[in-house]
Amino acid sequence: MNERPTTASAPGGGAGWGALGREIAAAWRQFPGRELFLAMVLGWVLLFQFLGNSTLGYVKTPSLFGWMVYAYEMNPDDAHGYFIPILVLVLLWWKRGEWLPLPKRAWWPGLIVLLLASALHAAAFMIQQTRLSIAAFYLGLYALTGILWGRAWLRTVLFPFCLLVFCVPLGTLSEPITFPLRQLATSITVKCAHWGLGIEVIQKGTLIFDPSGRFQYEIAAACSGLRSLTALFVLTWIYGFVFFKKYWQRGLILLLAFPAAVLSNVLRLLMIVMAAQFFGQAGGNYVHDSTWLSFLPYVAGFALVYLVGRWIEPKAQSAGQEGEAAPPPKAPAGQEGRA
């Protein structure tokens, strides 16, 4: 039986956590099959708790979640995986005005998605590819919501759910990404220093050094820009989801994460080179180790994304206005009452 949705009001700033809790409870009561959903989620979680990981040589646990914690702790570049599920829930709540009014009913084709997730996990378990099991786990959760709440629900929450891909730890698999990023950032930095700043530096692989030997810096894997790329991907994902409705807009904003990350990393390297040029190796090291100075270039990267977003926003509005039906022509004066 379908339950009629009601519109939940936004909690006031002074209402406190109690009002927010009551609003969440009111929204939750609009979902049909709540007990069945919780039971299915519990069963899905137990499957991955006891039969989630087959690579016992790295960490001796059958739990997928135990392996995820191990992977996050081993590589700081993957530690953001702890916070992504919370971020997805916050985004869903932020955009509750889009999914609260939806009719929620059972949609049996969602079982096909659940079977695909189960098959993916079974294959990943047999070939010991735990990362694929993580993808299967979140795909299964997505399918469970669709089975009970319908296709319209799945379509509405697809974009924030896809953010869960950042829960998959890359580990050593990131090397094919980090090394080209290091080379690209190094090459652009050397050219910008020469042509833009008049500072002569020499590049040798991912090493930048002064011809006189006053300073040198190795663009290590930690400085490849992978962290900034991941952070900007997440930020652009949020920006696109919150402020844009059309998928082409969201896709364009998301694609800007790569050039924005490269721009941010190059600006940071140029700041280090400039400091080293005037204050020697110690000056460049200070800029490299400073949290605030290292953060500044990424403001420029997100500013690029924001400016493009402001540019495409009026285009989207004008496109929507062109698609609206034109009003009927007004009758000549004196003929309004004639048949």
Image: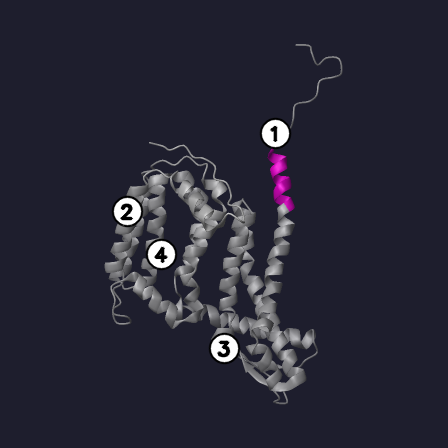
Q: Of the residues under marks 2 and 1, which one precedes in the sequence?
A: 2
Cα separation between marks 3 and 1: 57 Å
The residue depicted at 45 percent of the width and 35 percent of the height is: 6
The residue that disc 2 covers is 40
> In the displayed structure, does residue 198 sit left or right of residue 297?
right
**Quadrant assignment for the C terminus:** top right
Q: Nearer the viewer, mark 2 or mark 3?
A: 2
Is the residue 213 above or below the residue 137 in the image? below
Question: What mark, if any, has residue 325 been given in the picture?
Answer: 1
Q: Are marks 4 and 2 in contact (CB under 8 Å)?
A: no
Magenta span contains residue 212: no
The colour scheme used here is: one colour
The residue that disc 4 covers is 135
Question: What mark, if any, has residue 220 been given in the picture?
Answer: 3
The region drawn magenta spans 314-324
Q: Position of residue 152 (x, y in %)?
A: 42, 39
> In the displayed structure, does residue 263 sit left or right of residue 160?
right
Mark 4 neighbour density, 10 Å: few (under 14) some (14–19) many (20 or more): some
Q: Position of residue 159 (x, y in %)?
A: 46, 49
Q: Are marks 3 and 1 in contact (CB under 8 Å)?
A: no
Q: Of the residues under marks 3 and 4, which one precedes in the sequence?
A: 4
The overriding secondary structure of the stretch rendered in magenta is helix
Question: What mark, if any, has residue 230 been given in the picture?
Answer: none
Q: Are marks 1 and 4 in contact (CB under 8 Å)?
A: no
